[in-house]
Image (spheres, rainbow, N blue to C red):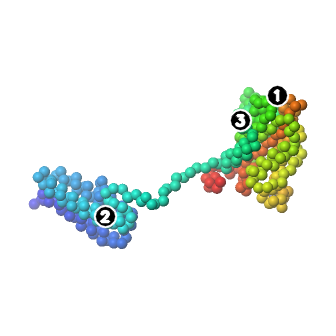
Amino acid sequence: MPQSPKNDIEQQLKTLETQLETQLKKLGAQINQEIFMQLKNTYLGRNGKLAEIMKTMKQAASADRPAIGKIMNTVKTNIEQRIAALGNRTGGGSTTGQAPIDLTAPGTTPKLGKNHPITQMIYAIYDIFESLNFEIGEGPEIENDWYNFDALNMPTDHPARDMQDTFVLPENLLLRTQMTAVSAREMEQRKPPVRIISIGKTFRRDPADISHTPMFHQFDGIMVDEHINMGHLRGLLHTVMERIFEKKLRVRFRISYFPFVEPGAEFDVSCTICDQKGCPTCKGTGWLEMGGCGMLHPKVLENVGYDPMKVQGLAFGFGVERPVMIKYKISDIRLFYQNDLRFLQQF
Ligand SMILES: [Zn+2]
C-alpha cells in the first residue's frame, strides 16, 4: 500500500536528519570553513534538501499540513543548530544569515594608483620654480614654424634645423621639437620682467633605443629683466639642480652653441652616483650633462617684442626623463613608456 503524502514527508525528514548525522560522523574532525559552507548550502540553501522536501508539502491533504509543518520546523531547527555548532568551530558564523561581521578584523585596503615617475618629477620641478616666483607657461604640442624655429633665431635655411628633425604636418605645422617654442609664445604675451617655466612633451624623429624615444619631456625656462647675466643663470640652475637631486652638487658651464642664445653653454652637474670618482653613468668624467642654456639672443628678444638694449634674458632647456633616470638609476628610457606595473610601482 502506498504511503500517504503525510507519512512520506515525515519519512523524508527523518532520513534527512539521519543523513546529516552520518555525514558528520564520517567527516569527524575534518570539518573546515569550506566543508561547513557546503553543508550549509546542501541542507539549508534555497535549493537545498530541506527546501526540496518543503516543496512536496502541497501534495499533502490540507488537514495534515499543520502537523507536517510542525515536524518540518522541528527538523529544520535541529539541522540549523547542528550546522551552526560546526560554524562556531570553524568560525563560519550563523546558519540563518550571512557570516557575522567581526568589527575588530583589519579592513581591506583598496589598491591605490599613483603618479607616473615622470609626472612626479614634473610636479617637483613646478614646485621648485613656483617657490622662485616663476609663472607656468603653456602652449600647443602642434606648433607652427614661427614659434618653433623662426622666432628662436632659426630661419628656414638655418643648419640648426637639421639637428631637430621632427614630424612635419601640412600648412607649416609640426610637432614641437622644444619647449622653447612655448617660452617664445609666453614672452610675446607679457612685458618684462618675466619669469616663466614651461614643462611638456616634445617630439623628435628618433627611433626608440636605450636613451631615445620619439616623444620626451622638457622643462624650459626664461627670465627677462634689466641687468640679468650669466651669474644669475648659474645660481638659478645650481639651486634648481640641488633641489631636484636633493643633494649638494658642483656645477659647471661648457661653452656651446644654440641659435637662440648668445653666449650659449651646456650645463653639467657633478655625478650624483659616484661623487666624481668616475662611473659608467658619467663615462668616467665625474660630470653629468643636463642640458643647454645661455643668454637670450638679441634677435629672439626683438622677435617677441622686447628691446634688447633695455633688457636681457637667461634661458635654459633641460630634459625631464634624464634627471629621473639618474636619480633612480634607470638605464633604459623606454621603461617609462611600457606601462609595466612592476616597474611603475617602484616609485
Ligand atoms: Zn659618475
149 up-or-down from 329: above or below: above
**Front residue (pair 46, 172):** 46
Amino acid at the residue labelled 1: Gly
The residue pinned by badge 2 equals: 83
Q: How many marks?
A: 3
Mark in the foreground, 2 or 3: 3
Amino acid at the residue labelled 3: Glu
Q: Earlier in the sequence, mark 2 or mark 1?
A: 2
Amino acid at the residue labelled 2: Ile
Relative side of 270 to 36, left or right? right
Residue 336 percent coordinates (x, y): 68, 49
The residue pinned by badge 3 equals: 138
Q: Earlier in the sequence, mark 2 or mark 3?
A: 2
The residue pinned by badge 1 equals: 305
Report the residue at 78% width, 44% height from top.
Answer: 318
Where, by quadrant of the figure, is residue 206 drawn?
A: top right
